[in-house]
Image (cartoon, rainbow, N blue to C red):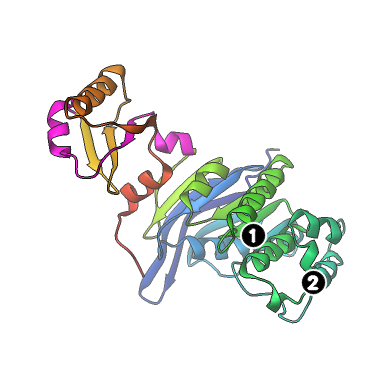
Amino acid sequence: MSIPSAVEISGLVKRYGTATAVDGLTLTAARGAVTAILGPNGAGKTTTIEICEGYRRPDQGTVRVLGMAPGSAALRPRVGVMLQSGGIPPAVPAADYLTLLSRFHTSPIDPVALLELTGLTSVARLPYKRLSGGQQQRLSLAAAVIGRPEVVFLDEPTAGLDPQARRATWELISDLRTAGVSLILTTHFMDEAERLSDHVVIIDHGRMVAEGTPANLTGTAGQLRFRAEPGLDVEGLLTALPPGTAAKESPAGHYVVEVLGGAVDPTLLATVTAWCAERGVLANSLRIESRTLEDVFLELTGTELRA
């Protein structure tokens, strides 16, 4: 008998009144992998995750987590959920909260070890309300994994963290994946998704618009980036470049030459550097790279802000 995927969603629809939050979404999250579900505000990703967690019921379609219906009694001990905020009594010390949670599981991670792993040992006796925002996030993550779950849902796991705490959280997520845990991640940090994820799903207006590995989505090394004085004649540079290329300055003094659907070759590199040399321009920090996941995300979902 085949092992079920971590999450299987087919034809999922969820409406709130006349608004459709999720519109026929179908996706699969593999076992033992990190799957990132990305989308702009209002895309339907939070609703999708809440249905997977058993907090909301779909209007149409099917959702299975480890082959079972979300929220079922048999599934609950096998799933961990990290909430972005709330859910922890404000007056309870961090150590006491994890100790209490550990008693609800048959084979929990030792609370003392988990406090050390998440960098909370020094604040273990402080009540939740006195922890910083980053410390509260790490405690929520610890609470989600203390029962050694097979699937963990992470909602913006590094929101509000400083760089050191963010990197420590990344390491913990990577360690969980290495241990065979399946992780479903939502985040607004594209570099985080690109670094951590085995598979990325981008949704917009409740529908999937792209999926694949970060490398599949970003493609070949089709960008040449360099720094120079602001205000170079980008249109003039374009006339020197072969067809099928684009150039822009964004932000000021940062230039990108992109091969649309292709890769940077030696001829293109020589053309750009010669054009700069002819104008007495020194191209600094010149590098060849793929599009970033953020580039792909903005191309697919647009650049305008959404409420």
Q: Place residue 1 in its image quadrant.
A: top right
> On screen, 258 above or below 62?
above
Please state if 264 lies on the left or on the right of 133 as rendered.
left
Of circles 2 and 1, the one toward us is 2
Please tell me which residue is depicted at 50% across the width and 43% down the height of the picture. 194
Instruction: Indicate the position of residue 247 as horizontal and vertical percent values.
Output: 22, 37
Task: Report the disc number at residue 97.
Answer: 2
Secondary structure of the residue carrying tag 2 is helix
* Quadrant where the image shows the C terminus: bottom left
Please state if 172 lies on the left or on the right of 223 as rendered.
right
Please tell me which residue is depicted at 48% across the width and 67% down the height of the picture. 59
Q: Amino acid at mark 1?
A: Ala
Q: Residues within 10 Å of mark 1 (few under 14, many from 20)?
A: some
Q: Is residue 141 magenta?
A: no
Magenta extent: 214-243
Please state if 256 lies on the left or on the right of 59 as rendered.
left
**Residue 302 in view of the camera:** yes
| Of 272 and 97, the residue lying toward us | 272
Residue at the limit of the structure toward the front, as seen here:
280
First in sequence: mark 2 vs mark 1 = 1
Residue under numbered circle 1 = 69
Secondary structure of the residue carrying tag 1 is loop
Q: Are marks 2 and 1 in contact (CB under 8 Å)?
A: no
| Of 134 and 108, the residue lying toward us | 134
Please state if 101 lies on the left or on the right of 222 as rendered.
right
Please tell me which residue is depicted at 56% across the width and 70% down the height of the picture. 56
Instruction: Indicate the position of residue 305 as horizontal and vertical percent values.
Output: 33, 64
> On screen, 130 above or below 25?
below
Q: CA distance from mark 2 to mark 1?
A: 28 Å
Q: Place residue 221 in its image quadrant.
A: top left
| Of 258 and 184, the residue lying toward us | 258
Instruction: Indicate the position of residue 36 as horizontal and vertical percent values.
Output: 53, 49
